Image (spheres, grey):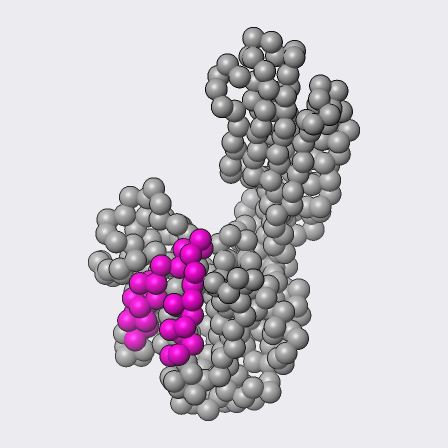
Amino acid sequence: MSDLLSQSVSMLERLVAFDTTSRLSNLELIDFARDYLEDMGIPTRTTFNEDGTKANLWATVGPEDKGGVVLSGHVDVVPVDGQDWSRDPFRMWEADGKYFGRGTADMKGFCAIALAMAPEMKKRNLKTPIHFAFSYDEEIGCIGVRGLIKDMAENLPLPTAVIVGEPTGMKIIGGNKGSRGLWTTIRGVPGHSSEPHRGANSIMYGARIINLLEKIQQEMRDNPHEDSPFDPPYTTIDLGIIEGGTAHNIIPEFTKFRWGMRIHPGDDGEAIEQRVRDYIENELNPELKAVSPEAGITMELVNVVPPLIPDTESAAEELVRYLTGLNQSGAVSFGTEAGFFQEAGVPGVIFGPGYIQQAHQPDEFIERSQMRECVEFMAKLTDWASENG
């Protein structure tokens, strides 16, 4: 087991060295992983984005005519811009039983362990296949996995379970919230700030929409779901970016902001969005159009991520429970790719090394003890797959 852990750490160091920030190409990492697997005789397939600068990687260890178990992870990472790192974030270092570097916890640690286990899996002549599914652009809306799952569903035997290795502290997570992301753009009418009646202040109109979002959030907070596994137990509204105005003495013509929802299973995110659209069309746009026909507000839906609906009796949860002896599963409010697999008919569970609290932070790290625990789990999974057809 110590050899497998050492190999996993070495693989993690190699993966961290690839700067796969979502704004960049991930092809160097994907090419490395593909060549590494194919050199062992493990077949792979790739799916690309529109311009061919990014790719997903699918690989199968074991029989190709069976569904099997998927080990799913994204290989893109969030930016390090503006963060105070102690060292180069793309050169992994070790201290106090921890491995530091961008992506160590989220989630190259899991991917590295899977790759390091591949030779052992190959040697064991698995009866049940284990698949690797490595995706791009998860951090900007689970973009890449959609093409990977489409290819899987159309061309391959449907897997029986997927383990999405997001950092959960090696605890079983059986559900996550879905999300919707939107850009709202307000075009007002510019003018001198001393004559506000001759223009239309886009920032103030934006504030009225934001006030409605705050009201909706309060309504959700006042009506939480009973016995919910989620924290908080209701749909949340987020507002992360706002831009508007050019000078203090100019009525601002343009304002835009990015907002969204983390949707509790059972809530209707589309209905919440429609409520905001109705307010804009029925109250705000008529006022703006009365000042200028060119003024108005538009709202663009830019991303939808489905939830992973908890199912304690799913094949994925049952398998992880059997291999680990864990008896409980929880739920998280952050999004993952698991819901896309579930929509495609593949039950999923979120289960991986590291902690989400370290993700996206300067000096991100994963503990050696978490790596060891995940290696031990992968070894048990390999044993199971070699004995069960």
What residue is shown at x 60% (from left), y 69% (from top)? 149
Instruction: Give residue 217's position: percent from left, percent from top.
Output: 62, 35
Left/right placement of residue 289 relative to residue 354 reads: right
Q: Quadrant of residue 169?
A: bottom left
Between 318 and 64, the one nearer to me in the picture: 64
From this viewpoint, which residue is outermost toward the left? 95
Quadrant into which the N terminus falls: bottom left
Is 71 rendered above or below residue 245?
Answer: below
Is 144 rendered above or below residue 266?
Answer: below
Q: What is the number of callouts on the image?
A: 0
Q: Quadrant of residue 5?
A: bottom left
What residue is shown at x 55% (from left), y 12% (from top)? 193
Left/right placement of residue 114 relative to residue 64 reads: left
Q: Magenta residues, as a range?
A: 7-36
Quadrant into which the C terminus falls: bottom right
Between 69 and 220, the one nearer to me in the picture: 69
Instruction: Give residue 106's position: percent from left, percent from top.
Output: 41, 58
Q: Is residue 312 visible?
A: no
Q: Main secondary structure of the magenta part?
A: helix
Is 83 rendered above or below residue 9?
Answer: above
Q: Is residue 35 located in the magenta-colored stretch of the structure?
A: yes
Q: Is residue 290 visible?
A: yes
What residue is shown at x 28% (from left), y 77% (from top)? 2
Between 243 and 93, the one nearer to me in the picture: 243
Instruction: Give residue 190's position: percent from left, percent from top.
Output: 59, 19
What residue is shown at x 68% (from left), y 46% (from top)? 269
Is 366 rendered above or below residue 254?
Answer: below
Instruction: Give residue 221's position: percent from left, percent from top.
Output: 62, 37
Left/right placement of residue 203 relative to residue 37 reads: right
